Structures are given as C-alpha cells and as structure tokens.
Image: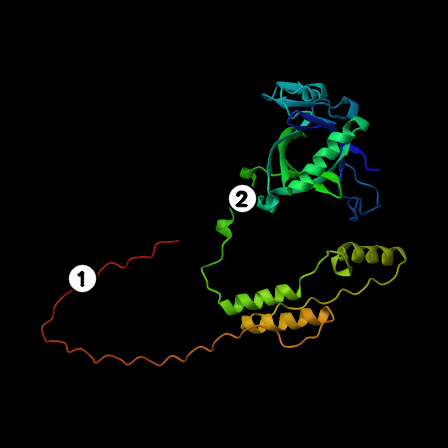
Amino acid sequence: MPRTIWSGAISFGLVTVPINVVSATEDHSIHFHQYHLADQGRVRYRKVCELEDREVSQDEIGRGYELTKTQVVPITDEDLSSLPLPTAKAIEIDAFVPLESIDPLRIAEGYYLQPAGQVAAKPYKLLVKALSRSAKVAVAKYAWSGRERLGLLRVRDDVLVLHAMRWPDEIRDPTELLPAPTEVSEAEIDGALALMETMTTDSLEGPEFTDRYTEALTQIIEAKREEQPLPEAPQPEEPAQVLDLMAALNASVQQAKTARGEDAGPAEVHELPKAKKKTPAKKPPARKVTAKKTTTKKAPTRRPHSA
C-alpha cells in the first residue's frame, strides 16, 4: 500500500469529499551511490552550520525566509498549515472542461485520490460517476510544497486521479524553434499518414514498450558481479541522409509491416511528379554603348530585413 503524501478534501461546490493523496507511479530505474575510488568508501553529503562549523542533525534544522544577511524570519510547519488560503487543505474545483482543450504539455505527474473513510464513500462515488458521464475533466487549485498549484481531476478505473498542471506562464513559447520556411507536397503527407497507419497500435503493452536501458544496465551489473566479460554493445547505425523523402516513407512502411508480421506488399503512397528539366534562357542581345561617357551613381544596396 503506497504511503499517503497529503490529506485534505475535494471541494465541489457545497460538496466536500475527504481524500488521501497517494502516488500513482513507481520508479523502477536503477540508482547509484557516490563512493571514494581509492577505497570504495561511501561519499555522503552532510549538513553543516556555517556559524558553528559543525554538522547538525535533522531535528536542529528549520526553515526560514532570509530578509537580509543577518535577519531570517522562521517559518514553522504550523505556519504553513494555517495559511490564509482556501486551497491550503482542500483541492478546490474551479471549472469543468473537455480534456482535448488542455495542452498535454501542461499536464505533469499524477496522483491517486483515495476516499478518507466511510463518510467520503458516497460523495467520492458521486464525483466519479458525474465525471465519467460528462466526459469532462475538472480543473482545480491546491497548495502543496510551498506554492499554490493548478490541477486536473479525471477518472481512471473508477478512481479519481489528480494531475499536477503547469501554469500558463510556465510554458515556453516554441515559435523561436520553428524550422526555416519550407513546403511539403500532398503526396508526402499521404505517405506520412500511410506510415502512421501501419504503426498504429491499440495498446502500449508488449516487448517494444519496456525499459531497455534498465535491462541493459542490469546486464552490466550482473556481468561485473560475476567477473564476466561485459556484453557487447550493438553498433549504432549511422543516420542516412534523406535525399528522396518519398522513397524513405515507402521503405519505412515496408519495414513497419515486416516488423508486425504483415504482408509487406506495395505501400499505398503516391509518388512525387518528376521535376521538369529547365531549359537555359536565351541571352538578350548586347546593348550598344554610345561613345559619350556618362557617370551614374550606384543605388545603395538594400539588405533584406531579418525575419
């Protein structure tokens, strides 16, 4: 049973749902420690008081806000629990919106919301049923870890899920990352759609959706523990320079079909029309120059404005 991260209530109009918040995800990655190379002694971080120049224990440590170099305002857990903020102990629902109206970039980590006791069972189920039937998600505010946050409430297998959300000003403007202006043909778009259709799957389950990095790292650790030769790393293929985009799309469709065990017949991708050969333009006849010499001023060259 995962531990409770936060306890409070969901505020839904005049309806209150007491809940406990637990993590919805697990970390299965391999973690390392730092150690001294000479004798493999563990290297640790220690908390040292700058004034006394000694290590202090956790029960001697508090938090505070530094007004000046010599003045600190202490902030206790009791201070934080009694903030003059309605979301300090409640997840306050502000609105209901269609899920597709929310940019996925704003959605962060997820948590399960567990009803806190029998008294919460009925209002909890009421909110679950209402959200499921409306096909909408709830947008809420809550205060955790020293700041007020925006959240998204949805239903997963009859359990309420809270996703942390980023505020609008936390999302960077991507326009500066746009590539140089270029055009793609309808045939190339059709080819990309054909490849997408070949790679479409109904479930993100299976051997292709496993953490191969952790598996490879486990092999390295086991080989070193058993004092065996390390497994050979496959040589990465050099990325080929795409000269013919349509040919690359056709080859990708065939490769995807073969990987899925399908008949790798001809791909339904239209070919680009062949470019017409350009005929060299005829040179205009040379202009006659009169004997009289005239001096002309050259117009200043105008530099193109930067985009």
Q: Is residue 288 left or right of 251 when viewed as pictured?
A: left
Position of residue 168 relative to residue 247, above or below, is above
Q: Is residue 198 left or right of 6 when viewed as pictured?
A: left
Quarter of the image for residue 202 reads: bottom right
Residue at 16% x, 64% y: name it: 296
- Closer to viewer: mark 2 or mark 1: 2
Quarter of the image for residue 194 reads: bottom right
Question: Residues under labels 2 and 1: Cα distance?
Answer: 49 Å
**Image quadrant containing the N terminus:** top right
Q: Label 1, on which residue?
A: 297
Label 1 crowd (10 A; few <14 / some 14-19 / many >=20): few
Q: Is residue 46 visible?
A: no
Position of residue 166 relative to residue 279, above or below, is above
Furthest residue to the right? 226
Question: Tag 2, which secondary structure?
Answer: loop
Residue at 24% x, 58% y: name it: 300
Question: Tag 1, which secondary structure?
Answer: loop
Residue in front for this viewpoint, 235 or 247: 247
Residue at 12% x, 68% y: name it: 294
Tell me the tag on residue 145. none
Q: Label 2, on which residue?
A: 172
Q: Earlier in the sequence, mark 2 or mark 1?
A: 2
Q: Amino acid at mark 1?
A: Lys
Residue in front for this viewpoint, 240 or 20: 20
Furthest residue to the left? 292
Residue contact at pointers 2 and 1, CB within 8 angstroms:
no
Q: Amino acid at mark 2?
A: Arg
Residue in front for this viewpoint, 139 or 182: 139
Give the percent coordinates (x, y) of residue 4: 79, 32
Q: Is residue 283 visible?
A: yes
Give the percent coordinates (x, y) of residue 182: 46, 62
Residue in front for this viewpoint, 77 or 209: 209
